[in-house]
C-alpha cells in the first residue's frame, strides 16, 4: 500500500489506458521495436498528468534530453492517475496491452512473474550502469528464483511523525521521540491531557488502511502477518495481541486517541496539520503534504523510527518489462531508467537543485535508493540543496539502521480488509474480544492464502 495518494516529487501516477482499440496496438505496448529510421520505440507509463504541471514538465524535459543523447531510441510516455489501476492491471497484462516498460508496486513483482508476464532482465543487467549501486534489499524484491525481473525506482519505510510544538507544550523533550510502545502510550496521554480537542496518538481503521497500519505495528513488535512460506496467518500471536492491547488501552483507558474513530489518512493528516495531533505512523512523504495541504509547519514536524526497535514496513515501486519486449527494447528501457531515475543527484527524482527552484521539498530522509559512493553522492547533492529542517529527521535515519525492513504481505489488500475489521472493533468497542478477533482473522487470512 502506498504511503500517500500523491507523493510530493515521488509522484505515484497512473498507467494510461488506451481510449480505443485502434490505439491499442501502437500505444499500449505492441512489442514492435521498428519505427521510421530504424529507431527502437518503447512505451512507458507513470508520466505525471498535465494537472501536476511541474512534475509533468520535469518528466518531459528529462525524457527529451534522453532522446537527444540517444537518437536511436523513441520514448512514448503514457499518463493518468494513479500509476497503476488495480482494476485494469491484470487485464492489460493478460491481453498483451501493457506498456513495454511499466510501473509496479513492490508487492506486484512475484505476481507478475507468477503469471508469466515479465521479461527476464538478467542477461541485460550490464546495460544498467547503476544496478550494483542500488540497495540489495530493494533489488531482491524484483529477483525471483535467481532471475531479475524489475528495477526499483523508489523505496519508503514507516516511522513515527510527531509534533515538536505539542511535545514542548506537554513538557516532553522534542528531541527525544518515544522509542517503545510503552513510551508512545505515556507521551500520548500527556499530550491528550492538554485538552482543547488535542489527540495524543491517532491511527487508521477504515478503507484497508487500518490493516496496513496493524501490519506495520506488528512488524515493529517483531511479529509477522503470514508465515515465511506464505501459507498460514501469524497474527494470532503474542505480538498481534500486544498491538491490539496497546491500541485498546490508549483508546479506552487513557482516552489519548480521541473519541472519533474509523479514521483514514486524510483525517489524520488534517489533525496533524492543524496542530491537534501529537503522533501517528507514516513515511516521510507525508511531511510536505502536512505543510502544503494541511497547514502544518516544517519546523514543528519531526520523524522518528518505528517504536519497538524490531522492524518496520517498507514499500515502494519500480519498473518491470513486458514479456513481449524485444532485446533492443529491453536495452533501451534500461538506458531510460538509468537516465530518468537512477543517476545520483540527477534526473526526475534526483535533480535537487531543480526541485529547490520550484519550492519542492528537498532534504527529506527518503527515498534512499543507493548504497556506497552513489548514496554518498546523492546525499551530498541533497544536503547542498536542502530547504527543510533535516535535523528533524536524523533520528529516523539513525534508527532505521538497526530495524528489520519488511515488505507488505502477499495478498496485502485482501488481508488488510480482514484486519481493518479487527482494528476498528478494538477502537470502537470497549469490550472488544481481542482473542476472538484474532482467531477469526487468522482463519479468514488462511482462506485467502489458500486461494492464492
Image (tube, rainbow, N blue to C red):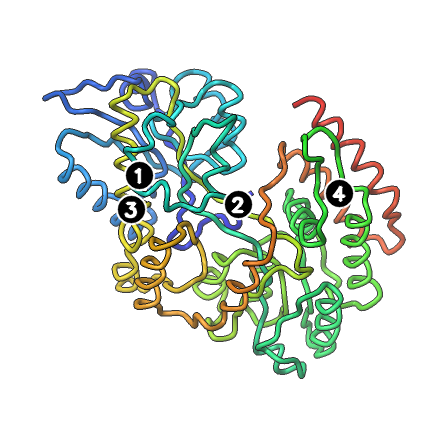
Mark 2: few/some/many CA within 10 Å (<14, 14-19, 20+): many
Q: Element under label 2?
A: strand
Q: Which residue is mark 1?
A: 337
The residue labelled by disc 3 is: 56
Q: Which residue is mark 4?
A: 421
Q: Residue at x 28, y 21 (%)?
A: 327
At 53% from the left edge and 65% from the top edge, which residue is drawn?
398
Q: Nearer the viewer, mark 4 or mark 2?
A: 2
Q: Position of residue 179 (x, y in %)?
A: 66, 67
Q: For the residue labelled by badge 3, is the local secondary structure a helix, a strand or a loop?
A: helix
Mark 2 or 1, nearer chain start:
2
User: Where's residue 283, x and y in %?
Assistant: 53, 56
Does residue 138 appear to the left or right of 68 in the view shown?
right
Task: State which mark lies toward you, 3 or 1.
Answer: 1
Residue at the disc numbered 2: 315
Gap between marks 2 and 1 measured at Cα: 19 Å
Q: Earlier in the sequence, mark 4 or mark 1?
A: 1
Where is residue 197, by image quadrant?
Answer: bottom right
Amino acid at each position: 500500500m502506498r504511503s500517500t495518494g500523491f507523493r510530493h516529487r515521488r509522484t505515484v501516477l497512473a498507467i494510461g489506458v488506451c481510449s480505443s482499440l485502434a490505439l491499442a496496438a501502437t500505444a499500449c505496448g505492441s512489442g514492435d521495436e521498428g519505427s521510421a529510421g530504424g529507431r527502437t520505440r518503447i512505451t512507458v507509463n507513470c508520466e505525471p498528468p498535465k494537472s501536476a504541471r511541474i512534475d509533468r514538465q520535469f518528466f518531459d524535459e528529462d525524457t527529451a534530453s534522453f532522446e537527444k543523447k540517444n537518437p536511436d531510441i523513441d520514448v512514448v510516455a503514457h499518463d493518468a492517475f494513479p500509476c497503476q489501476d488495480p482494476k485494469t492491471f491484470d487485464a492489460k497484462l493478460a491481453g498483451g496491452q501493457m506498456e513495454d516498460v511499466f510501473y509496479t508496486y513492490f508487492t506486484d513483482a512475484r505476481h507478475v512473474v507468477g503469471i508469466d508476464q515479465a521479461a527476464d532482465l538478467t542477461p541485460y543487467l550490464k546495460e544498467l550502469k547503476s544496478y550494483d549501486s542500488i540497495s540489495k534489499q530493494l533489488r531482491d524484491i524484483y529477483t525471483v528464483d535467481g532471475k531479475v525481473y524489475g528495477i526499483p525506482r523508489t523505496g519508503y519505510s514507516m516511522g513515527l511523525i510527531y509534533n515538536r510544538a505539542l511535545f514542548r507544550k506537554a513538557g516532553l523533550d522534542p528531541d527525544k521521540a518515544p522509542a517503545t510502545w510503552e513510551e508512545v502510550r505515556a507521551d500520548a496521554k500527556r499530550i491528550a491531557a492538554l485538552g482543547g480537542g488535542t489527540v495524543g496518538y491517532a491511527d487508521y481503521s477504515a478503507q484497508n488502511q487500518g490493516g496496513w497500519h496493524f501490519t506495520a505495528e506488528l512488524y515493529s513488535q517483531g511479529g509477522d502477518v503470514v508465515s515465511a512460506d506464505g501459507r498460514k496467518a501469524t497474527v494470532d500471536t503474542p505480538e498481534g495481541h500486544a498491538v491490539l492491547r496497546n491500541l485498546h488501552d490508549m483508546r479506552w483507558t487513557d482516552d489519548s486517541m480521541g473519541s472519533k474513530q474509523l479514521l483514514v489518512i486524510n483525517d489524520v493528516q488534517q489533525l496533524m496539520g492543524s496542530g491537534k495531533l501529537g503522533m501517528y505512523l507514516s513515511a516521510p512523504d507525508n511531511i510536505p503534504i502536512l505543510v502544503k495541504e494541511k497547514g502544518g509547519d516544517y519546523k514543528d514536524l519531526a520523524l522518528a523510527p518505528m517504536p519497538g526497535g524490531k522492524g518496520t514496513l517498507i514499500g515502494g515501486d519500480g519498473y518491470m518489462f513486458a514479456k513481449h519486449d524485444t532485446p533492443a527494447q529491453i536495452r533501451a528501457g534500461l538506458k531510460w531508467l538509468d537516465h530518468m531515475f537512477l543517476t545520483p543527484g540527477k534526473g526526475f527524482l534526483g535533480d535537487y537543485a531543480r526541485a529547490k527552484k520550484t519550492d519542492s521539498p528537498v532534504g527529506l530522509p527518503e527515498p534512499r535508493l543507493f548504497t556506497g559512493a552513489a548514496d554518498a553522492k546523492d546525499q551530498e547533492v541533497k544536503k547542498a540543496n536542502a530547504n527543510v529542517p533535516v535535523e528533524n529527521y536524523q533520528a529516523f535515519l539513525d534508527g532505521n539502521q538497526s530495524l528489520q525492513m519488511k515488505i507488505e504481505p502477499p495478498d496485502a489488500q485482501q488481508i488488510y480488509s480482514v484486519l481493518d475489521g479487527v482494528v476498528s472493533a478494538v477502537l470502537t468497542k470497549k469490550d472488544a474480544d481481542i482473542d476472538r478477533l484474532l482467531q477469526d482473522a487468522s482463519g479468514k487470512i488462511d482462506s485467502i492464502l489458500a486461494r492464492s
